[in-house]
Amino acid sequence: MLTGAGISADSGVPTFRGTDGLWKNFRAEDLATPEAFERDPRLVWEWYNWRRELIATKQPNSAHKAIVELERRSPNFWLITQNVDGLHRDAGSQKLSEIHGNIWKVRCTGCGLVENNRNVPIAILPSCADCGSLLRPHIVWFGESLFVEDLDCCSRALRQCDVLLVIGTSGVVHPAAGFASIAKQAGAFVAEVNLDPTPQSALVDISLQGRAKDLVPLLLDPA
Ligand code: APR
């Protein structure tokens, strides 16, 4: 499975490109790039504090929970999420790759140590307990590449899967935007769940238009 911000929209987490999307109100280049962090780490941390504070009040919805049940039922299951909100983990997903990182993890810019940190707010500017260097969000920013272990894991899953379900992503940010095509070329049946058509809609075998929280649970009892 591949998920995007749309699956968390039903939990009240803002998407990025919808009408009230984050990138409508904030400039990604000022907040979600290594250059932005280099230029003004305080501003970037203030923005991530705002997102952490918001997400801390949100719960997994029925779509997140249905995916946990699908994982339990399916021997060969893997979830690739672009979301950093941690709601899949909170719902109980264990076989997953958080390919854009996790907003509840911090990474030391000095020694590279990655730790969970659920402090809301997090003290600005946070420093590493081990080496004293500045901590950054453990999130893949624009202009940064995904973690190799995640890319390898996604590549294996996409090439071996029989079915790929693409839920709640606008399909414009690579490499995830190319995942449906990889699975399709490997012979998988690809279905999409989204409120609107996406660039993948013409490629997939079936495109289901509706809210993830309404459609995804139907997979459990298709009758
Ligand atoms: N159910 C299903 N789909 C929904 C719902 C819903 N309730 N609400 C919104 N959507 C769909 C929108 O139609 C849109 O296609 O979810 C998609 C959200 O798209 P984006 O906001 O672009 O989020 P995403 O595709 O996850 O963005 C990918 O871009 O900014 C970066 O790193 C960030 O991970 C993010 C990446």
Image (tube, grey):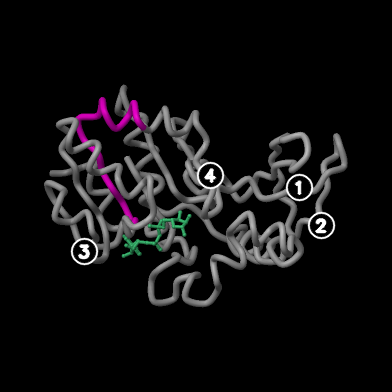
Give the mark toward the camera: 4 or 2: 2
Give the mark toward the camera: 4 or 1: 1
Q: How far apart are marks 3 and 1 (CA)?
A: 39 Å
Instruction: Give the residue at mark 1.
Output: 135
Mark toward the start of the polypeptide (4 vs 2): 4
Q: Distance between the residues labelled 2 and 1?
A: 8 Å
Write the residue at 69% across / 58% down: 37
Give x and y (percent) for residue 122: 77, 56
Label 4 beta carbon less than 8 Å to ligand 1: no
Q: How far apart are marks 4 and 2 (CA)?
A: 27 Å
Instruction: Give the residue at mark 3.
Output: 197
The amino acid marked with disc number 4 is: Asp
Cβ atoms under marks 4 and 1 closer than 8 Å = no
Give x and y (percent) for residue 131: 86, 36
Residue 22 or 37: which is nearer the viewer?
A: 37
- Magenta stretch encompasses residue 105: no
Q: Can residue 213 be seen in this view?
A: no
Residue 90 numbered mark, or none: 4
**Highlighted magenta segment, given as a residue range:** 155-169
Mark toward the start of the polypeptide (2 vs 3): 2
Write the residue at 42% across / 28% down: 152
> Secondary structure under badge 3?
loop
Cβ atoms under marks 4 and 3 closer than 8 Å = no
Q: Is residue 105 visible?
A: yes
Instruction: Give the residue at mark 2.
Output: 125
Residue 143 or 203: which is nearer the viewer?
A: 143
- Magenta stretch encompasses residue 158: yes
The amino acid marked with disc number 1 is: Leu
Outermost residue toward the top in this view: 75
Give x and y (percent) for residue 23: 48, 70
> Secondary structure under badge 4?
helix
Question: Ligand 1: which quarter?
Answer: bottom left
